[in-house]
Amino acid sequence: MAIVAVAMSGGVDSSVAAYLLQEAGHQVIGLTMQLWSEQGKEKEKPGFWKAVEDARQVADRLGFPHYTLNLQESFEQEVVQYFITEYLQGRTPNPCVVCNRRIKFGLLIEHARSLGAEFIATGHYARVEQDKETGRYVLLRGIDLRKDQSYFLYGLSQEQLRYIIFPLGLYLKTNIRQLAERLKLNVADKPESQEVCFIENNNYREFLKQRVASQIRPGPFLDQQGRWLGQHQGLPFYTVGQRKGLGLALGRPMYVVQLIPEENAVVLGEDKELYSRRVWAADNNYIPFAELNA
């Protein structure tokens, strides 16, 4: 059996993951990351400190050590700045993918090793297996397809995947809730969080205004031929495929089909103009094989 560090968010999934590892005979260490400061909001929204207390109570009940790690500076540099930059460049970011690769399964693994851990585990609904023919580690969907989180983990490297355990990959969410209730864990009825952890009330527009207001300027709505249709409120506030919230009355449904950051322009078109025969992709990670041979 191994020493396994469990990333504990204070929620039901990571808590039950820790229990399952214990039941399998592993020695568990609980780790909770402080990624974002909620200064001045402790009374009205305990946030992180409530998560720490919930995780610590689970650790005490199950009988394993629990540590808190302050990773705010790295999170700001690696995730928050990426989030802002992507929007300013006319792209829609996915901060959870970057956080998983650089923080949760990057820095956290390093801290876990310093505590003697051999593996790291989380409450993600996904699976990792080793391909017997190639020897490479592959990322698979969790069996609960409604809760599958493998997409958010696509950026993980072979070096990361080999040290990861996903105890919930073979479980349904309903089973995990039931198990938490049977164990009388304090987090058994805790609701799930669906928001980006550093965006209050899921209002990313307000967040961008607070952080980079000077870089957000009104600009033109254009049609496919470059004709002026109206004025938008700022390039980062729109994404390709968007229809609602444009603030225009053009007599027919119009969608965002392109963002041009060099011109601070948002191009609109009908739904058929959203389709394309080409795709431009970057930052690819072909997990089952080292490189793509066409």
Image: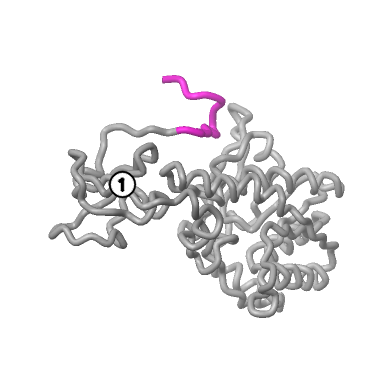
**The quarter of the displayed image where residue 277 is located:** top left
Residue located at (64% from left, 68% from top): 12
**The quarter of the displayed image where residue 226 is located:** top left
Residue lying farthest to the left in this orientation: 251
The answer to whether 107 is drawn above or below residue 51 in the figure is: above
Mark 1 = which residue? 266
Judge whether residue 16 can be spotted in this image: no
Comparing 87 with 118, the one in front is 87
What colouring style does the render use?
A: one colour
Residue located at (64% from left, 34% from top): 158
| The C terminus - image quarter | top left
| Mark 1 surroundings within 10 Å by alpha-carbon count, few (fewer than 14), some (14 through 19), many (20 or more) | many
Is 202 one of the magenta-colored residues?
Answer: no
What amino acid is found at the position of numbered circle 1 in the picture? Val
Q: From the viewer's perspective, tell me whether residue 125 is left or right of residue 223.
A: right
Question: Percent position (x, y) of residue 67?
Answer: 82, 60
Q: From the viewer's perspective, tell me whether residue 206 is left or right of residue 190.
A: left
The answer to whether 11 is drawn above or below residue 106 in the figure is: below
The answer to whether 131 is drawn above or below residue 65 in the figure is: above
Residue extent of the magenta highlight: 282-294
Comparing 63 with 285, the one in front is 285
Residue lying farthest to the top in this orientation: 294
Is 292 one of the magenta-colored residues?
Answer: yes
Judge whether residue 110 can be spotted in this image: yes
Question: Percent position (x, y) of residue 3?
Answer: 82, 50
Residue located at (38% from left, 32% from top): 280
Comparing 123 with 211, the one in front is 211
The answer to whether 113 is drawn above or below residue 42 in the figure is: above
Question: Percent position (x, y) of residue 68?
Answer: 79, 60
Question: Percent position (x, y) of residue 177?
Answer: 60, 72
Which is the main secondary structure of the residues drawn in magenta? loop
